[in-house]
Image (cartoon, rainbow, N blue to C red):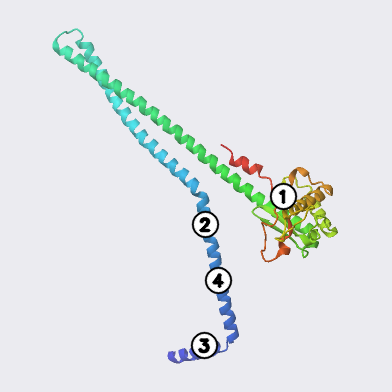
Amino acid sequence: MHTKHILTASLLAINIFACVPARKFEDMQARKNDLEASNESLRKQNQQLEAQAKERDSNLEELKKSNEALVKDTTILGNSLRHLRTQYDKINELNELLSSKNSQLLGNANEENRKLLKELDAARLDLQKREDALILLEQQINGKQTTLDNMTAELQNREQRLKELEELLAKQSENAEKLRKKVSDALLGFKDKGLNVVEKNGKVYVSMEAKLLFPSGSTKIEPEGRKALIDLAKAIENETELEIVVEGHTDTDKINSSAIPRNNWELSVLRATAVVELMTSNSAVKPTILSAAGRSEYYPVDPNDKAKNRRIEIILSPRLDSLFEIIEKN
């Protein structure tokens, strides 16, 4: 009877699985593959983060090891000090005993008394040497303790500086992303006109292709380019903790002219200067945080696309005074 029930259940299971569509099985298999790939990617990211954490903590680990060595040395010296103190107490008892005998024998001038006195003097000399050794050992222990205290204070100081640096870098990264979004929002209308805004290494890069700003070979800014630059200047005019570099870039086509601009160097510098002048004359951006630079043809973004290489790059860098102050702390 039991065998019959098992056979019936097996047939029922076969019928159920036979009803599962092949398409659903394939979807489930694909989902399984996607989950396995995602899991592998997360595992690699976790390994990278662990490696960075290990590298960041290596200096702290070395200091902690030095601290542990000093603690061990101090413990050894402390044990030696206690041992010498015990010996000192015993010798002091002997000295008191000898002094007592000396008082009894002072009245006798025989050879035995002189021998006892000589032994007493030798014992006192030995006691003095042990006292000197004890004082020296105490000085060494005090020196070790001072070094240990200094190392502990330095370790705490470095841990605090590391914490301050991490917090400051996180804050600067957050501010850079906010600035990028602010600039992107201000220039949203020019997104598909050769303008690009990115954040990289804590800096915001605004790249404008020359076709948006200048006629070929000219340093005069086109009306649409003027509007984009003024919108940018207005968006950042209240940002006081920035350093702004305007870089002019050209393509590799040579300029041979007796009039200015006479070559690509002059063209790139004059275009950068024209952008700086336009920004300062149409906004409250302080000239003291602006600088103009010409890069000529030597920093292409795409060797196969001259149009992309003819550009103006405006680099917005946060001031790093606070970061340098933390690094330079003694």
| Amino acid at dot 1 | Ala
| Mark 1 surroundings within 10 Å by alpha-carbon count, few (fewer than 14), some (14 through 19), many (20 or more) | some
Q: Is residue 188 left or right of residue 90?
A: right
Label 2's element? helix
Quadrant that contains the C terminus: top right
- SS of the residue under disc 3: helix
Q: Amino acid at mark 3?
A: Ala
Crowding near pointer 2: few (<14 within 10 Å), some, many (20+)?
few
Q: From the viewer's perspective, is 95 left or right of 207?
A: left
Residue at screen point 53% across, 68% down:
40
Given this view, does label 2 or label 3 mark the residue nearer the observer?
2
Residue 69: name its quadrant: top left
Image spot of residue 27 (x, y percent)? 59, 80
- Whichever of labels 4 and 1 marks the residue nearer the N terminus, that label is 4
Which disc, if any, is residue 293?
A: 1
Q: CA distance from mark 2 to mark 3?
A: 47 Å
Secondary structure at numbered mark 4: helix
Residue 107, placed above or below residue 215 = above
Depth check: give the residue in front, 249 or 95. Answer: 249
Q: Which residue is mark 3?
A: 13
Judged from this view, the residue extending furthest toward the right is: 223
x and y percent of residue 313 in the render?
72, 55
Quadrant where the image shows the N terminus: bottom left
Residue 114 rendering spot, x and y as whole percentages: 17, 12
Q: Are marks 2 and 3 in contact (CB under 8 Å)?
A: no
Question: Considering only order in the chain, which callout, 3 or 4, is on the residue closer to the N terminus?
Answer: 3
Mark number displayed over residue 26:
none
Q: Which residue is mark 2?
A: 50
Residue 93 is left or right of residue 52, and the answer is left
Q: Residue at x 75, y 47 (%)?
A: 239
Q: Earlier in the sequence, mark 2 or mark 3?
A: 3
- Placement of 191 over or under 267, stated as above or below: below
